[in-house]
Amino acid sequence: MIIKRDYYLQQLISGKSNNLIKIVTGIRRSGKSFLLFNLFHNHLIDSGVDESHIIEIALDDRINKNLRNPDVILQHIHDRMTDNGLYYIILDEVQMIEEFTDVLNSLLHIRNADVYVTGSNSRFLSKDVATEFRGRGDEIHLSPLSFAELYGSIGGDKSELWKNYYTYGGLPGLLELDNEEKKAAYLQSLHETVYLKDIIERNNLKNSDEFTELIRVIASCIGSPCNPSKLENTFKSVKNESLDRKTISKYLSYMEDAFLIERAMRYDIKGRKYIGTLSKYYFQDIGLRNALLNFRQVEENHIMENVIYNELRSRGFRVDVGTVEVRSTTGRKQLEVDFVANKADRRYYIQSAFAMPDDAKREQECASLKRIDDSFKKIIIMRDDIKPYHDNNGFYLIGLMDFLLKPDLLK
């Protein structure tokens, strides 16, 4: 099955011939190779590019082992560039080249070369990109399949597809598996043999057990505010183990670098500043999160919040967790806005409301939004399949399916 990942393909197309290295990052098995070797390749051919002007090298293929030598691959590329026309150079798993940063810098000096690469999260991470190619690289972060991408390709009953999605996530390899047991086994195997192995080897971790335990703790509390100090206390009181906050902070950064999780910072809406205390962590693929917990904590309400966060990020929004301070006779307290989503001149305040069965619950969900006095749009996303409407407060209420399948609704 071919899923057209048009959002990412358009980013590659718009970056053609911009004198930057196009760097496709993302968690393993999210479809980076397919995006370049199939979708982008087909675009080039359809655009009239001659096949001989597309140089593709899969460096994880043993047949190309000799090309992992930096001098050999550079000579190989030069030998294939036989005229002054533009050549598209596509390198998959570029981190397998020895001294790969030198190789990429050398390719930048070739005037008629347009370079595209993918890299494994084991050695070619977003921080590496920022450090090694500042001002010379154009990063395109590929997320796992969104619900809309799946529904657009598979169709069928939305409710059944949603159940499958919030349980097994959006890694493309799942589409080849025909039952739930195979899907669960696939995700658990990936977690053990790919993701954990990458992080442990890259960072030379001596105690992999405590790292594994921490990532399970993070998986069990998605959507809950936490920080290294709070997690340290959790290990002492619940796990009866000692794991200091400095080590926890380091381990969290490893998970972020490997694209397993993302951190949403807390933002004081009225004070217009970030609060350097508690943050929230969300998994880039919910199926991997569930596999970490052996599919024992598949709570739809918390997972819905994680999916909304991922959807906003995949649409190019910067996403924070909002706070609004409220004073009362009993003192001050912080009310939370699930998401403050920003892109260019747009801002949305968004609440994830799994259900609002009565007035008390409705008031709870609306309390923080009522205390925001600017004119940006305030949105409540409900699990129920409702017709979008504005309530008496001016808040915009939409159903989850509409949010996931109709991105223009936010406008």
Image (cartoon, helix red, strand yellow):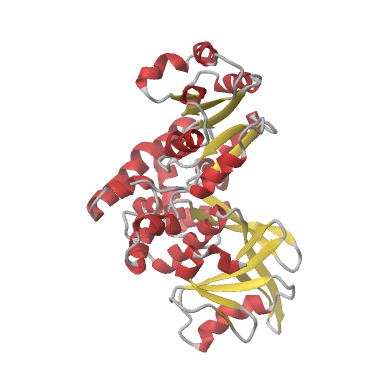
| Picture layout, residue 136 above or below residue 28 | above
Q: Residue at x 35, y 42 (%)?
A: 190
Seen from the viewer's position, the closer of residues 87 and 282 is: 87
Q: Residue at x 51, y 34 (%)?
A: 44
Q: Residue furthest front?
A: 48
Residue 247 lies, in percent from the top left, at 54, 42
Asked if residue 68 lies left or right of residue 327, the reply is: left
Residue 279 lies, in percent from the top left, at 59, 57
Residue 227 visible in the snapshot: no
Q: Residue at x 45, y 65 (%)?
A: 304
Seen from the viewer's position, the closer of residues 337 and 41 is: 41
| Picture layout, residue 340 above or below residue 98 | below
Seen from the viewer's position, the closer of residues 140 and 198 is: 140
Q: Residue at x 62, y 37 (%)?
A: 138
Residue 263 lies, in percent from the top left, at 57, 52
Residue 152 visible in the snapshot: yes
Q: Residue 23 sits in which quadrant?
A: top right
| Picture layout, residue 345 above or below residue 256 | below
| Picture layout, residue 248 above or below residue 207 | below
Residue 69 lies, in percent from the top left, at 48, 14
